[in-house]
Amino acid sequence: MTTLNISLTEELRAFIDEQVAQGSYNNASEYVQNLIIKAQLETMLLEGLDSGEPIDVTDEWWELKRSRLTGMITKLQPQLLE
């Protein structure tokens, strides 16, 4: 893992320390990493929403998707299903 030094206002540092103190994170680094991951996920979700025409997602659609993905996993990594 690599190190990145950043400058924060005292208010931001206090806020991060408060989040860590609440027990959800082990340290400030873990909190900031989590924020970045959430931002990346949000970006991917928004890109997905803008990626084409909307479709109706029904129980049947999910079953077909699950079946196709299970088949792909079985072909690529049989030991994952054990």
Image (tube, rainbow, N blue to C red):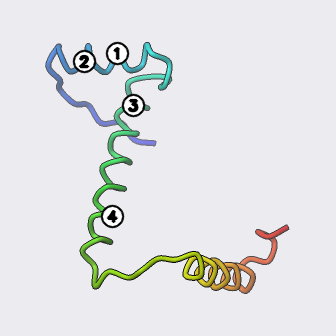
Report if the CB atoms under discs 3 and 1 are less than 8 Å apart. Answer: no
Say which amino acid is labelled 2. Arg
Residue 13 numbered mark, or none: 2
Label drawn at residue 31: 3
Please report whichever mark, 3 or 1, sits nearer to the chain's N-terminal start. Answer: 1
Q: Nearer the viewer, residue 74 or 4?
A: 74
Instruction: Decide if residue 12 is on the left or right side of residue 61.
Output: left
Is 56 situated above or below 39? Answer: below
Name, please, the residue furthest toward the right: 82
**Which mark, residue 44?**
4
Q: CA distance from mark 4 to mark 1?
A: 28 Å
**Callout 3–callout 4 Cβ contact below 8 Å:** no
Using residue 6 as the reference point, say whether residue 4 is left or right of it.
right
Where does label 1 land, which residue? 17
| Dot in front, 4 or 1 | 4
Pointer 3: residues within 10 angstroms few (<14), some, or many (20+)?
some
- Residue 8 left/right relative to 20: left
Res 60 → quadrant = bottom right
Q: What amino acid does circle 4 point to?
A: Met
Question: Percent x, y for residue 61?
Answer: 55, 81
Residues at circles 1 and 2 in contact by the CB criterion of under 8 Å: yes
Which of disc 2 and disc 3 is earlier in sequence? Answer: 2
**Comparing labels 3 and 4, the label whose residue is closer to the camera:** 4
**Placement of 66 over or under 11, stated as above or below:** below
Residue at the location (34% across, 40% down)?
Answer: 35
